[in-house]
Image: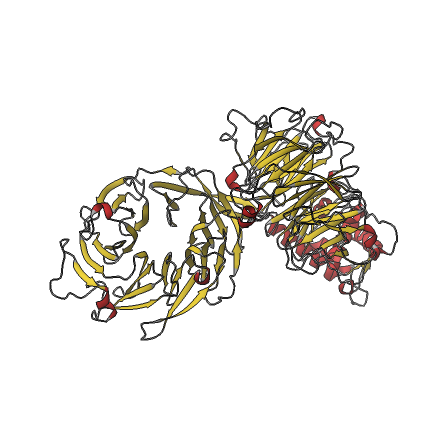
Amino acid sequence: MGTRMEVEQLESRMNADDYRKLQSLFLESSGASRSLSRAEFINLAWSSVGRGSREEYGLLFDSVVVTQEHCGLLLDSDTVKEEGRVDWGGLSSFLLQELSDKTKNTRTNSVPYWKPPKTLACPHRDPVQKVLHLQSSGQYLTVSKRGTVGLRNGEDMSLLHTQRLQNSTVTLKDLWVTDVVLLHKIHKIAVSFTSKELCFYDTLSEQDFSCKYKLQGLKFTPWCLDYWENPSHPDQAILTIGDIGGQVSALYFNSAQISLFERFGLRTDSDSADIILWDELVEGKHRVCQTVTHRAHAPAWVRKVRYLASLEAFVSCSTRPQSSMVIGWREKESKSLRVTSFFTKRGVWDMDHHHGLNVIATAGVDHQVLLWNPYVTSEPVCALSGHTSPVIAVRFMQTKQQLLSYSKDKVLCLWDVANRWSVHRLGSVFPKMQEDTHTVMFFNEEKRHLLLSINSLLLLLETREEKRISSHEHPVTCVLYNSLFRQVVSSDSASSVICWLAETGQKVKQFRGCHGKAEISTMALDGTQTRLFTAGTDGEVKVWNFNGHCLHRMNAGLGRAVDISQVLLLKRSILVMGWERIVTVFRLHSFSQSFVEPSEWKGGAQHRGDVLCAAFQPPQTLVTGSYDGEIIVWNNSTEKALRKLRPHAEHDYKKQQDSNVSLNGKEDSEDCIAITRLFFIPGRTSVTAAADLVSSEGSGVVRLWNTVHSRLMGEFTAHNTELGSIAMTVSPCGKYLVTADREGTLKTWDIEHYCLEPEDRIATKPPKLLHSCRPHLDRVTHLETCIHGEKLLLLSASSDYSVALSYLPGPTIGLFGQEEQWYFERPGALHPQQKPEQDQADHKGQKDKEPEGRKSPPAPSETLADPGCDTSAEGGEVGIKDEQEGSGTETVVGREKLLS
């Protein structure tokens, strides 16, 4: 029996003469082109080329037919070409596409690896307000809230000098710095104070920051500053001020190198600083300085201001939704600005601009990073979702198309802006601080120094480059194992499905546009393993055979775009859930038509929150978990609710609704109680006293239940609660529980003897941690266990575009799509992306039982599934009739054709 891998070996063995012989087969004696049937192609190619076997040419032919007919998973059969024949154009196009796909899927991306944060000696006992880099000397300057200036060596970051800024206007105990900017060419810093003034200090002398000017009489307290110097004309510069009254003001200097302001008499104060009054600037008494203003943010505070020379405009942001971001365009010879406002749900903390891409990034209070075209106010270019708390800082890497973002829960993310995906996520490494923290982020792109201040603490993060492998071109949303064809099936957010060889990790084929432009949120396989169910955010569930035909469209959302979190296949029905308090059910007798409407769920709405997940245990026990943390046990035959399981009996559901938590991680709260996954533990069906159900919550908590007696028997925190929802699965043998978090970490727990007997108290001690590793660099979206041959394996899908294969329990074998193939019969090097790690913080003293470099097969007892457990179909035996294949009985796709 051949495989697609053998076809690739045939292609690699063929040379240019062999391909010329192949091309000649598609020419008539008259020179006209022709097509060949399968039998004709096999006989002619095998006899003419003489390389490879008949079976290999048959596999090559089938691959071309599938690709030729279905460049995507096409529903409209009228667009399909004549079946069963191949011409030279189709064959050559297939070979070129295979080469292109192989190049894409073996590509590696250069990403930074962050070294552990280094705490720097800091003279500040109060929050650091700003970090500046002095380009002339290469040194760093830090300024604290109370006016302490620290000067650091640019190489080893050692502290060289400290100085306290003087301001005779206010007493030292009342001194409060709000922001600082560097005036490079004229060797000054501008400092804003809560005393409603700006002071300009000379930096030529490191020992004495003398005050040269004081701009006083501002109407509101200045909160943020920005300074731009014209590189072609150093005398031209712009200082921009944002204040707590919602006003943005800009000062245009036309002789900055000579004097920022004109001197009127000897108006100085005790600091020997020239006093400049704001009203005089507005009235135009200073010919060397002009002002323009707007108040589009009022009454909100202006959080950040920037002057963008490429746009000749001022960009500012606030936490007011209606004026989350405002661009002020200066009209010629006018002191007013024409403004355009950008709307977000909850406002913006920070923003940055990429000069080359002309894209503005905003740090959202709603946990999202948005990218904007400055000329389009209606909607952002895209949303980068992955943070679970408000984003408070964003910084572009100008020499790369990458973006850094930092959130309130101390998570640092690196994004690939061009491809709109998360390159790296760093969390749980920053020190725990009080909740109300002041954070400043500064990135020196040339030296690759990231300076992060958290209150008075100053941290240095340095980077080195790594190589990263991608299985998909977009974030992966789901992964399944097809035991019939011994293949792995994965889906992504761009509506693509890819089939992989589990034996080697190489791609078999790819189907694009399954749900148009809608994301595939989850998938399922029927009991025969010949039908694939894909659920899209367009509200439809589609049924496919593995030749790429869409057999049925299930109208789950009733024409609406909804978030489908799970599709559960049972013997006589299919359950779809994720967006309503009631389960959406499809009866098998309704599948006589291609477009299938849902039936009525007899049990009605028993949940108070949206149903997010379900699990089934033969012969008739169904459990469903909801958004409000409640689990309901049903009789699936009667669809009657039997009992409820709820750990938070007194929980205020309204409070949970207000926390804006979503399953897919867009806006998770720290105390999320939503039930995200449910699994019955195989082998415990006959043990009535033991825990037979395991559930996971959005806060990283795992619970074990006895569904017969409605008893909570155990609960433990599997991952840091600040990471939000986790992925989870249970092995077919019922011995292993696997959990995964938003940082790409996988943990394998031994639950074989966990919660077998009821106790007086709920067990809170975690089960034995067998293994912990990090094969992914971002959120793990789905986990799946499988038995391949005699080996118990784990599949994991991630938002970092990769699908990983690991031993269970044990190290990671590799990433699907990597250039080097893996083989189970021999040990090999781990893939470059893997970073083994011990979970020492939460489980001290528990060490991995198997070295990372060893790839020994699991023990025989670990490879046998429970006879009554069908993990691929959740215990069901659903089989959908293939109406398009002209038969009234179930059609099993030939294994040889699928592998093509």
Looking at the image, the residue that sits furthest to the bottom is 333
Q: Nearer the viewer, residue 512 or 617?
A: 617
| Image position, residue 461 (x, y; %) | 40, 42
Residue 34 shown left or right of residue 771 in the figure: right
Question: How does the figure colour the protein chain or chains?
Answer: secondary structure
Residue 353 shown left or right of residue 647 in the figure: left
Residue 449 shown left or right of residue 69 in the figure: left
Q: Residue at x 50, y 40 (%)?
A: 722
Q: Nearer the viewer, residue 51 or 132?
A: 132
Q: Residue at x 80, y 45 (%)?
A: 878
Q: Nearer the viewer, residue 818 or 33?
A: 818
Residue 821 visible, this angle: no
Looking at the image, the residue that sits furthest to the right is 888
Q: Residue at x 61, y 38 (%)?
A: 696
* Whether residue 448 is situated above or below residue 401 in the rendered picture: above
Residue 434 shown left or right of residue 38 in the figure: left
Q: Nearer the viewer, residue 399 or 571?
A: 571
Q: Quadrant of the N terminus?
A: top right
Quarter holding residue 157: top left
How many numbered tags mark residues here?
0
| Image position, residue 150 (x, y; %) | 26, 44
Looking at the image, the residue that sits furthest to the left is 266
Residue 33 visible, this angle: yes
Quarter holding residue 163: top left
| Image position, residue 632 (x, y; %) | 69, 41
